[in-house]
Amino acid sequence: MATTVDKIKDIEAEMAKTQKNKATSFHLGQLKAKLAKLKRELLTPSSSGGGGGAGFDVARTGVASVGFIGFPSVGKSTLMSRLTGQHSEVAAYEFTTLTSVPGQVMYNGIVVTNPNPNTYPHPWPVTLCINCAPLQMIDLPGIIEGAKDGRGRGRQVIAVAKTCHLIFIVLDVNKPLTDKRVIETELEGFGIRINKGPPNITFKKKDKGGLNITNTVPLSHIDHDEIKAVMNEYRINSADIAIRCDATIDDLIDVLEAKSRSYIPVIYVLNKIDAISIEELDLLYRIPNAVPISSEHGWNIDELMEAMWDKLQLVRVYTKPKGRLPDYSAPVVLRSTRCTVEDFCNAIHRSILEQFKNAIVYGKSVKHQPQRVGLAHELADEDIVTIMKR
Ligand SMILES: Nc1nc2c(ncn2[C@@H]2O[C@H](COP(=O)(O)OP(=O)(O)OP(=O)(O)O)[C@@H](O)[C@H]2O)c(=O)[nH]1
Ligand SMILES: [K+]
Ligand SMILES: [Mg+2]
């Protein structure tokens, strides 16, 4: 019996020899959908095509975790030791790291809360926040091309990265830059979408009425035939599909496969810049979302930390006990997708909700300084909050 990998190869071969035009678009849509389903099968651990074997996942600590992905010997473990002080074996030979190694870094973002009372929305003096947030770093074994299809232990490695809040794709600047594309393809093949959000497509299944496809922008990549072919392949006969971006067939499939897709920010960590010239370094600075560093020499690590903080989009909220100054020593750190007053209360202690009356907020999330808000109010970075009890 043909394995899932074989079936995938067959479909890919057929797609390669099928020219894209009006007459073939239905067929191509069908093939793409088939391919997506087979790939999902491959990623489901219990499937026959699956790699099996123990995973590398680790207990999560801190407010967010950052996974290190890269080819062997690009310097992931050197970076890990540099950032966290956590020892992770470093050596010149490939596959030195054999399992996941977690460590913690305290992001020491210094927050100047009141540089100018006229422009800053609260009346307290300049204060520094030192320990801003504990972040978990996860050093991982090196992967090789074909990892997503089961080569080496790449699948387990990428599976850990898929549950992280940020991925460092670590590259050796002495190696060809095409490595970047290879790693991206590995992650994409595993359902990870890099530095982008879900496509702006809404999709609602219905019991009857057929397919109702609307688009608010012209579609230059797909026609309705292709969309129908994909839906047909997913056995969806009736649905409202509203497309609000110039979507591709892959975007549509991502929406249908939403459960197995993860949208994760990535920083390209371009390591070993100690081995190149200034002219070469200038070129590296043109690559978007990249930070050139030297793990070994500790060069540009601060810039990497800042880029990490920006990408994580964490929200620091300071508590202000009634009648006292805000406590800047230890912010409550929330993720930007879950940063309501209710999330804030839960992060402190569950029991707070039982006595909650309202919250008094100073900061960027409110129009008036201060403003009384309820549980559903979304907080912003550096807000100051007093919880009023009943
Ligand atoms: N010149 C230079 N060498 C580095 C740098 N960082 C790491 N190395 C060297 O690169 C080699 C591999 O480093 P590791 O940290 O073990 O690389 P890794 O990516 O963890 O490797 P695996 O665990 O095998 O995947 C070692 O010889 C390091 O000393 C750097 O910034 N500059
Ligand atoms: K190594
Ligand atoms: Mg290593």
Image (spheres, helix red, strand yellow):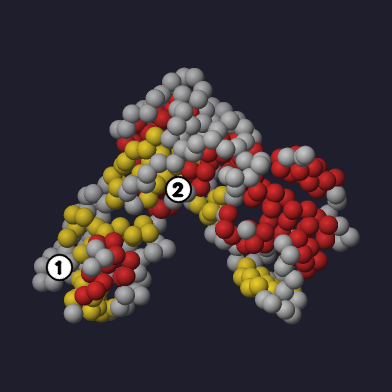
Q: Nearer the viewer, residue 29 or 1?
A: 1
Residue under the point 67% across and 62% down: 252
- In the image, taking residue 280 as reference, residue 235 lies left or right, namely right
- Residue 187, how many percent across, how many down? 58, 44
Residue at the extreme right = 23
Q: Secondary structure at mark 2?
A: loop
Q: Mark 2 belongs to which amino acid?
A: Cys
- Residue 152, how many percent across, how many down? 58, 30
Q: Is 177 rendered above or below residue 231?
A: above
Q: Quadrant of the C terminus?
A: bottom left
Q: Quadrant of ligand 1?
A: top left
Disc 1 versus disc 2: distance between alpha carbons?
34 Å
- Residue 246 appears in view: yes
Pointer 2: what residue?
164
> CB of residue at label 1: within 8 Å of ligand 3?
no
Pointer 1: what residue?
321
> What is the quadrant of residue 77 in the picture?
top left
